[in-house]
Amino acid sequence: MKLTDPVIGGGPKVQPEYVAFDSFGVMGQCTLVTTPDVVVCIDPGASAESASFPLPEPERRALEARYLDACRAAAAKAKAIVVSHYHLDHFLDARDPGVYAGKVLFAKALDDLPPKQLARAERFHATIAGLPDETVWCDGRRFKFGRTEVAFSEPAWHGEENAEPGTVVMVEVKRGREELLFTSDVCGPTFTGTAEFVANSGARTVILDGYPTILLGQLETDLDLVRSVINVCRILHSKGLKTLVFDHHHCRDYRYPAFYRLAYDKARQLKKEFGSAAELAGNASAVLRGLQDHGPTKWKKWAPLDLNACRTAVERAAPDPKTKKSLLRDLDRWVA
């Protein structure tokens, strides 16, 4: 398919299908988005969870195989494939005609990638050469399929500003008044600029990555979690937002409901649909089922993150010139 090919019109609907997510038991964020004009598969990839995930390794490997198959099946339905960045849980790194042949491939540009990710990206594009109808470096660009608009953010940090993993592209799919925003790996978000972009997007549905809480323990990462909680609550206040699918990095840690209790409380207060992809489908996240069935792995004791703990973390970090002076005010405005 070419970007100029005719498309069939239809009703004003943007319908997401959550294909492979950490709350299902596999590293990934694969999402299939269907409109009357186009089907887009975002980040068709999956990887096995690590040893801290409370499932036996054979089960983790079986889930990886199952959801890789699901990603292939989703990609086969799509006219357009998106690769938001080049971590292996976000794309199928193989010459797979069922995934890439005859498709428009919207791919993160290579010019600002860290060395390791750049080498992987160059190998990948060489491997699939000749399969896609078009490969489009999509950063900061916008495209039309009939009445559907598919837009890509400028490069967004994979975490805090100047984060070592580099940048990703966020994806917007919009038709009429319906809009979905897929953030990819924004890790919290902890960076204020990312939170502002998401909060101001106007999207009814946001698929948002949380903070990788498996890194908790140091002062700076404790403060990063508080930043994440503030920013998630800020996004929940977004006027047009109906559903916030909160999944990925934090859903690898069975402590996440305690760490994000304030966000769950805020969502209930604001009457927003909020939770992991599994939770929004009426199921427990896989990491919590694993904890129930197999017991804890890495962490034996933890406590909920409440407002007092948030304030303590901010006050403790206040002498650091890198700590944003308005953080306590933001905590009171968006979370309290």
Image: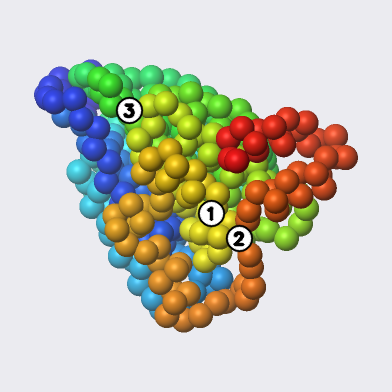
Q: Amino acid at mark 3?
A: Glu
Image coordinates of residue 328 in percent, x first then y, are 72, 36
Q: Residue furthest right?
A: 319
**Quadrant of the snapshot with the N terminus:** top left
The CA span between labels 1 and 2 is 7 Å
Please say if the residues under marks 1 and 2 sit with CB atoms less than 8 Å apart: yes
Q: Nearer the viewer, residue 248 or 232?
A: 232
Q: Amino acid at mark 1?
A: Arg
- Helix, strand or loop at label 3? It is strand
Q: Nearer the viewer, mark 3 or mark 1?
A: 1
For disc 1, the marked residue is: 261
Label 2 sits on residue = 304
Residue located 71% across and 35% down the image = 327
Residue 21 image point, x, y percent: 39, 55
Instruction: Check disc 2 and give the amino acid type.
Output: Pro
Q: Position of residue 209 (x, y in %)?
A: 49, 45
Q: Quadrant of residue 41?
A: top left
Query: Based on the displayed image, in which of its 4 quarters is residue 302 positioned?
Result: bottom right
N-terminal of the two: label 1 or label 2? 1
Q: Earlier in the sequence, mark 2 or mark 3?
A: 3
Number of numbered discs visible in the structure rendering:
3
Which residue, given by chain and number where applicable, does mark 3 sit on? 179
Distance (Cα) linking label 2 and label 3: 33 Å
